[in-house]
Image (cartoon, helix red, strand yellow):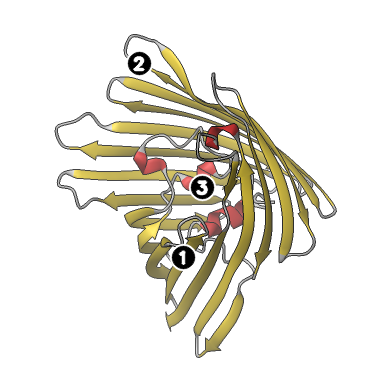
């Protein structure tokens, strides 16, 4: 499952999806790893149906991931990460991640297209292969795969600190944030994050997030609460997640809700669903899965996703 340990979650901020990748070059302190996936999947939902389209939508995709590292001195090394994705519905190559940086005894610093500091906190409850974590994605600075992103990360015993700054090509516009996580030896973890988006002449947007989880390898439980202010509206997000693993079968379920409240106090739900999935891992390279999202919004439609994934 996606939540095996918080350490993997933290590592993924810098080396996204490269667990189990093959080392194709290793010489004199320089290494290159390559990995990826081929994922054939489809969704069925009445939301896709109209005069020309059925309820069936293909969502197949493929990814290639590369990570290079090189030792400069005993206390300094450099790294670069690139990940591309091709989807079957448009055949366009998308750069998911593209960044490089330095690793020192004082931590890691990198620049490029990479996750914000908030993603570590979001991943406490974003555990599903078939979709989760929507309620905590509110202001722009809290999202993953942010371009022009400077990130600093360091771990002190059981505490990991992350900070990021997103520069913008638009004048007088930027975003910055920070997060902290604590991993207890007893199997539980805590996380907190803050992010703000600034635009000259407009009110700042701010978001605060708290999360906690418990993981004993077979059972995983997590909860998240977030609140954001954007101009004259406030948005609240709640996420609960649970997972159970027995042998090669993993069962996950989540509840996501996001409510927006205007200056007059009128509230409206933007996200609300219950989702459940089953994943069967034949080995570390091959899995199948099926998930269903029960949409709780008025006039919302349920969605079923089925997939087969080969990871290399």
Q: Mark 1 points at which residue?
A: 84
Q: What element carries label 2?
A: loop
Label 3: element kind = helix
Q: Can residue 73 be seen in this view?
A: no
10 Å neighbourhood of mark 2: few (<14), some, or many (≥20)?
A: some
Q: What residue lies at 42% left-to-right and 72% top-to-bottom?
A: 80
User: Which residue corresponds to the image point at 37% horizontal and 59% vertical from the top-left?
Assistant: 113
Q: Which of marks 3 and 2 is in front?
A: 2
Residue 120, numbered label: 3
Q: Marks 3/2: CA distance?
A: 29 Å
Residue 122 versus residue 66 in the image, above or below: above
Q: Is mark 1 on a helix, strand or loop?
A: strand
Between the C-alphas of marks 1 and 2, the distance is 39 Å
Q: Quadrant of the C terminus?
A: bottom right
25 vs 179, nearest the viewer: 25
Nearer the observer: mark 3 or 1; the answer is 1
Q: Which residue is drawn at 42% across and 62% down?
A: 92
Vertically, is 105 above or below 161? below
Q: How far apart are marks 3 and 1 (CA)?
A: 21 Å
The residue that mark 2 highlights is 262
Marks 1 and 2 in Cβ contact (< 8 Å): no
Q: Nearer the viewer, residue 42 or 64?
A: 42
Residue ID at (68%, 37%) = 292
Residue lying farthest front?
Answer: 51
Going from N to C along the chain, the mark reached first, 1 or 2, is: 1
**If you read the primary sequence from the N terminus, does the residue marked by circle 3 or circle 2 appear first?**
3
Residue 288 rendering spot, x and y as whole percentages: 73, 55
Q: Examine the rendering and report whether any part of residue 141 can be seen.
A: yes
């Amino acid at each position: 499952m996606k939540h095996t340990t918080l350490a993997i979650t933290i590592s993924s901020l810098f080396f996204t999806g490269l667990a189990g990748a093959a080392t194709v070059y290793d010489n004199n302190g320089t290494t290159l790893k390559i990995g990826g996936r081929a994922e054939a999947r489809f969704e069925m939902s009445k939301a896709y149906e109209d005069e020309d389209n059925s309820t069936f939508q293909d969502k197949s995709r493929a990814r290639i991931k590369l990570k290079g590292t090189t030792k400069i001195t005993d206390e300094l090394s450099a790294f670069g990460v690139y990940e591309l994705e091709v989807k079957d519905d448009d055949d366009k190559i998308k750069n998911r991640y593209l960044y490089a940086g330095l690793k020192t005894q004082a931590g890691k610093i990198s620049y490029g297209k990479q996750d914000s500091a908030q993603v570590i906190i979001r991943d406490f409850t974003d555990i599903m292969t078939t979709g989760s974590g929507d309620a905590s994605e509110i202001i722009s600075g809290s999202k993953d795969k942010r371009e022009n992103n400077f990130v600093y990360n360091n771990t002190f015993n059981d505490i990991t600190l992350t900070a990021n700054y997103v520069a913008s090509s638009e004048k007088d516009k930027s975003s910055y944030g920070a997060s902290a996580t604590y991993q207890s030896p007893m199997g539980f973890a805590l996380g907190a994050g803050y992010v703000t988006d600034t635009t000259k002449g407009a009110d700042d947007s701010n978001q605060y997030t708290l999360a906690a989880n418990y993981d004993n390898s077979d059972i995983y439980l997590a909860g998240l609460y977030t609140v954001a202010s954007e101009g004259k509206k406030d948005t609240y997000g709640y996420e609960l997640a649970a997972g159970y693993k027995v042998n090669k079968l993993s069962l996950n379920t989540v509840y996501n809700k996001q409510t927006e409240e205007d200056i007059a106090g009128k509230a409206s739900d933007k996200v609300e669903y219950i989702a459940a999935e089953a994943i069967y891992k034949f080995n570390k390279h091959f899995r199948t899965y099926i998930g269903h999202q029960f949409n709780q919004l008025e006039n919302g439609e349920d969605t079923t996703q089925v997939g087969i994934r080969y990871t290399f």
